Image (cartoon, helix red, strand yellow):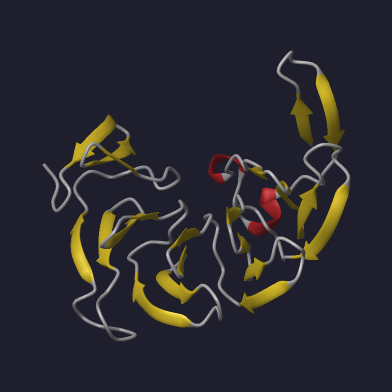
Amino acid sequence: MCVRLGPDGNERWRRPFEPLAYDEYNLGDSTATQVTPAVREEGVYVPDRDALVKLDAESGVERWRIPVETAYAASVVDDSGVVQTGYQETVAITHGGEVRWRRPLQSRAAAAVADDAVYVVADECHELDAVTGETNWRTRLLFRGTAAPVVTDDAVVVVTGSVHAFNRDTGGLLNSDRTRWETGEIHATAFASPVVATGRLFVVSPLGLLSLRSEESE
């Protein structure tokens, strides 16, 4: 269900959506993520069970619906369009509802978009060309990523229990110098994205909120 409330708390509109049965994909409730609608002036983007849906922000009327197999992560929107990850594919769509590209990349995490690149994590971290969807580079992860990566000017940070920072601008599809730094000592919560603020990296762990230096852990 997607509901819009006014400033006074009164309901403006609501639209029903078919809930995802996580057990069908061996996920279970403990790994289910809260999917937040992506809200822009031109519309509201909501993942449905097997589709990405755009709603009119004022009326809640459905503007378009694009098939995306098991779209169970939040949409990521920028000026060029929206990127939706899913159980079997990652899809880039314009604001008008035209599919720009599809890639058979499975991801339980939302993508990250920065500059002219899209970052998708699963068993590997992929940097994709935002226009074509082609892979610029990819690197193997020890565990499957389930939280959206965080992108800085120089690096992309991925949490999979361990914390990894990869160089964005290192050349080559499988360059051995991709890793900037990593730490497996803090057991970061795999379903929560890190946050960059005040020149530090904050991650959630069973011990609470931890602060890391920009290049290595404390």
Q: Is residue 134 left or right of residue 172?
A: right
Quadrant of the snapshot with the C terminus:
top left
Q: At 72% across and 65% down in the image, what residue appears?
A: 68
Q: At 68% across and 67% down in the image, what residue appears?
A: 93
Q: Residue 27 in the image: x percent, y percent?
A: 59, 52
In the rendered view, would you say 85 is above or below 186?
A: below
In the rendered view, would you say 88 is above or below 14?
A: below
Q: Residue 36 in the image: x percent, y percent?
A: 62, 40
**Residue 77 visible here:** yes
Q: Quadrant of residue 49?
A: bottom right
Q: Nearer the viewer, residue 77 or 88?
A: 77
Quadrant of the snapshot with the N terminus:
top right
Q: Is residue 107 left or right of residue 117?
A: right
Q: Nearer the viewer, residue 142 or 111?
A: 111
Q: Quadrant of residue 155?
A: bottom left
Q: Is residue 47 left or right of residue 199?
A: right
Q: Residue 106 in the image: x percent, y percent?
A: 56, 68
Q: At 24% across and 77% down in the image, what residue appears?
A: 170
Q: Residue 91 in the image: x percent, y percent?
A: 64, 69
Q: At 54% across and 45% down in the image, what residue appears?
A: 31
Q: Nearer the viewer, residue 52 or 199?
A: 199
